[in-house]
Amino acid sequence: MAEAETVEAMEAEAPERTFGEVVLKMDSIEVGFGGVKAIDNVSFEVRRGEILAIIGPNGAGKSSMLNCINGFYKPRSGSITFKGKTMKAMDPHYAAANGIARTFQNIALFRGMSTLDNLMTGRVLKMKKNFLWQCLYWGPAQKEEIENRAHVEKVIDFLDIQAIRRTPVGRLPYGLQKRVELGRALAMEPDILLLDEPMAGMNVEEKQDMSRFVLDLNEEFGTTIVLIEHDMGVVMDISDRVVVLDYGRKIADGTPDEVRANKNVIDAYLGVPHED
Amino acid sequence: MFYREAGIFKTSYAADQALFRIPIDKLFVIGLIAFAFIVIPLVGNEYWLGSILIPTLILSIAALGLNILTGYCGQLSLGTGAFMAAGAFMAYKLATNMEGMPIILVILLGGVSSAAIGVAFGLPSLRIKGFYLAVTTLAAQFFLLWLFQKVPWFVNYSMSGVPTAPPREAFGYLVTGAEASSTARYIFVLGFTVVLGLLASNLVRGRIGRMWMAIRDMDIAAELIGIKPLQTKLSAFAVSSFYCGVAGALWSFCYINTVEASAFDINRSFTVLFMVIIGGLGSILGAFLGAFFIFLLPIFLNSAPAWIGLSIASETIAHVEFMVFGALIVFFLIVEPAGLARLWGITKEKLRLWPFPY
């Protein structure tokens, strides 16, 4: 595989990446629905500033894992340690207020609202002015709107979506919707960004754009990223570490190279490359 | 459009987020309000002011309220009539038991009590959605009306059970009750409509409006962004019921001049719901368009044959009116399910490019 070799060569040239402390620790998480165990005793850690990929075949429990991280699912057992605080399960509001944002596998935008409003909705927790000020849309409430608007405009610039500011998102093409959804998560100024298949259904160009956004925001803003993705080329290229799930269990955890060489992973998911 | 956005550039976020982003829009609305306040009372007669404009404006307020709940927050409600009744009866109790209380405060407090009742009946919305929620609000409709009819305390033990609205003054003019001039009542109602309309448009373009719409469009994503579903839905119920309560109080005090539960039956709820649907869900303009359309169209249909010189028996007119009205509603829903406000938006968009659409 010539392509893989060039990638490795490029990686060798790149400076060594260093990561901060463990910001999120999932410990012996178990999630089940009735008699089905979706996640069975999985533990892993997320370090500040890294890009962690979770991969695995369909139904391996990847999305369930993200749902546990931001509190949409409550694990049956196990614990979550986030920023030094250990809890049995995450609360969605707590997660959002403390810097966990996510995008969804099936786009979950607010379809009736414009791009700008979608992004502004990402800022609701940053806005505190009370109801009466909002009725008047004047004084402190207006000041707050403008401050948050300024931040949202930075995100709009970053993602290059200025032209669709006022377009209702329901009318946008798929690729742009994915981008707006990323924007909404970024508007929350997250410490950890959970991306559920950010490149699903995209063409090569859109995938390149999206990969570039992910890498840029990791480098520029130091955002920690946990992503689920099926495109192995993308995963192996951009992630610092890969966790592999299969049937709800963790079968590997390591750098892309280690994972790629792991026999269990090859058997369960990657398969053997064709002779060509 | 004859006036265009072309050449209008915003240099600050404040200007870009203004209520009216195009100066002419702003002038037009100010002009319309001035016209409604100054010219209409001068040229309008008793019939137009008292029997057409006052009820239409009051129903616009109710439609605004329901639009906030159903159009912006996505919670279907059939209890509008009941919340209006709550406002009317509470305002009546306040006005009669505290003689000196200013009438504006009385009506606002009527709205506040209605808001409290709305929150109580909104509690099930955390668990149930759509048609099922509509059924629980239907329970509010029947229960509250039954309560107001059966408990004589609400009507101060009046013998007839249908007390008249007490006459009250605002700014030195008699504005409520049968003796008040229709001009004074009209201006009083119009004042409420304008202020509540502006407040509603401010609410829906700010943080709380976005929270409502987020819950409406994708409640799971909204929750994971940090929006608390229960509080957000209840706030929509509260604001919506407040608007309905104010509308109900005005209906009793400034329009029918009696406080009676039968004025707020299920038909009232449906009328307001139709206004919201025809006008446009999730649009402030739509609430007004819908109210005027639904209220004025039957009157127009009724008098149109006479204008063009046809003499038809009044029963026939009544039947034809129903048929045409029903057909028009179906027609509008097929042509533009998103309502008149959307139709207006599309027209504007087309005119922007007209006559060169590409």
Image (spheres, coloured by chain):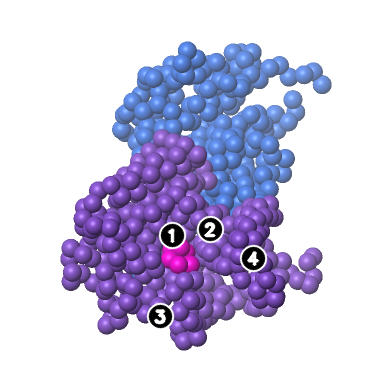
Chain colours: A blue, B purple
Question: What element does badge 1 sit on?
Answer: helix
Structural distance between the alpha carbons of marks 2 and 4: 29 Å
Disc 1 target residue: B62
Question: Looking at this view, is B279 or A94 the one in front?
Answer: B279
Asked if badges 2 and 4 are on one and the same chain, I answer: yes
> Going by the image, does A59 lie left or right of B211?
right
- Residue appearing at x 47%, y 12% in the figure: A35
Labels 1, 3: front one:
3
The magenta stretch is: B55-62
Number of residues whose C-alpha sits closer than 10 Å to that of mark 1, classed few (under 14), some (14–19) or many (20 or more): many
| Pointers 1 and 2 within a single chain | yes
Residue labelled with disc 2: B275
Instruction: Return the disc, 2 or 4, that comes first in the chain's sequence.
Output: 2
Nearer to us: label 2 or label 3: 3
Q: Are marks 1 and 2 in contact (CB under 8 Å)?
A: yes
Query: Which of labels 2 and 4 is toward the front?
Result: 4
Marks 1 and 4 share the same chain = yes
Amino acid type, mark 2: Met
